[in-house]
Amino acid sequence: MFIALVVMLGALGDKDGQIAQLEAELRSMKEDSEQALAELQAEAEQDPIVPWLDDGTATGQELSSEQLQARAEELERREQELADLEAELNALEYELAEVSFGPGAHTVGRDIEVGQYRVEPESSECNWASTDHAGLELDHLSGSRTDGAPVIVDIGPEVEVFESSGCGLWYRIG
């Protein structure tokens, strides 16, 4: 009987120890999560996109209809700004496509226009070549640049195809 009582007390002691250990782990986890929440709130307060943290929502308070309306108006304003910027970007990309071209073979009059073009080589091997309507290479419009210096070419009506590699984007300058 005495041995059974000692074994039972020992088992209870183990349970008490386990409970105490679990409680300590729980306290530690709670402290860690509170610390993480505080860090996130501090980070969000520094974020200009989250100005609403000052209105009490971070503490779980509900927003008034005026606050909701103000938020909705701000979001609409930002959406319009974004749409305007996107339209500007699309227009610029279109303009750029009209006055520039990249590597590969380009047919004059279809892919590119007659004119003067400039490139700042992207690599140490910038090569370009032109062929006339008979398919013959035009020596005065063919070359290679390995020093990275800008290249300017005049693509005239005698050129049928202008081809380049390793040069990057050619921009029309005249």
Image (cartoon, helix red, strand yellow):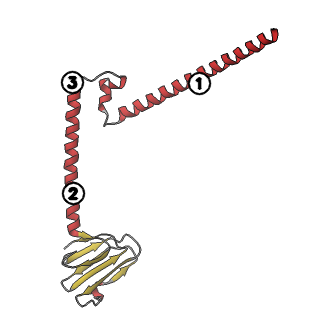
Q: Pick whichever, 146 or 108, lies toward us.
A: 108
The image shows residue 112 at horizontal and vertical percentages of 21, 75
Identify the element where label 1 is drawn.
helix
Disc 3 from disc 2: Cα separation? 37 Å
- Amino acid type, label 3: Ser
- Amino acid type, label 2: Asn
Position of 43 with respect to 105 (left or right) is: right
| Label 1 crowd (10 A; few <14 / some 14-19 / many >=20) | few
Q: Name the mark on residue 135.
A: none
Identify the element where label 3 is drawn.
helix
Q: Is residue 150 above or below residue 82?
A: below
The image shows residue 87 at horizontal and vertical percentages of 19, 53
For the residues labelled 3 and 1, say whether their Cβ atoms are less than 8 Å apart. Answer: no
Q: Pick whichever, 31 or 62, lies toward us.
A: 62
**Disc 1 marks which residue?**
25
| Label 3 crowd (10 A; few <14 / some 14-19 / many >=20) | few
Q: Specify which label sits upstream in the sequence, 3 or 1.
A: 1
Disc 3 from disc 1: Cα separation? 42 Å
For marks 1 and 2, give the one nearer the viewer. 1
**Disc 2 marks which residue?**
90
For marks 3 and 2, give the one nearer the viewer. 3
Q: Choose top left, top right, bottom left or bottom right for residue 48.
A: top left
Position of 160 with respect to 126 (left or right) is: left
Residue found 23% across the figure and 61% down from its top: 93
Q: Name the mark on residue 65.
A: 3
The image shows residue 7 at horizontal and vertical percentages of 77, 15
Q: Residue furthest front?
A: 1
For the residues labelled 3 and 2, say whether their Cβ atoms are less than 8 Å apart. Answer: no
- Amino acid type, label 1: Glu
Q: Choose top left, top right, bottom left or bottom right for residue 15.
A: top right
- The quarter in which the C terminus is drawn is bottom left
| Label 2 crowd (10 A; few <14 / some 14-19 / many >=20) | few
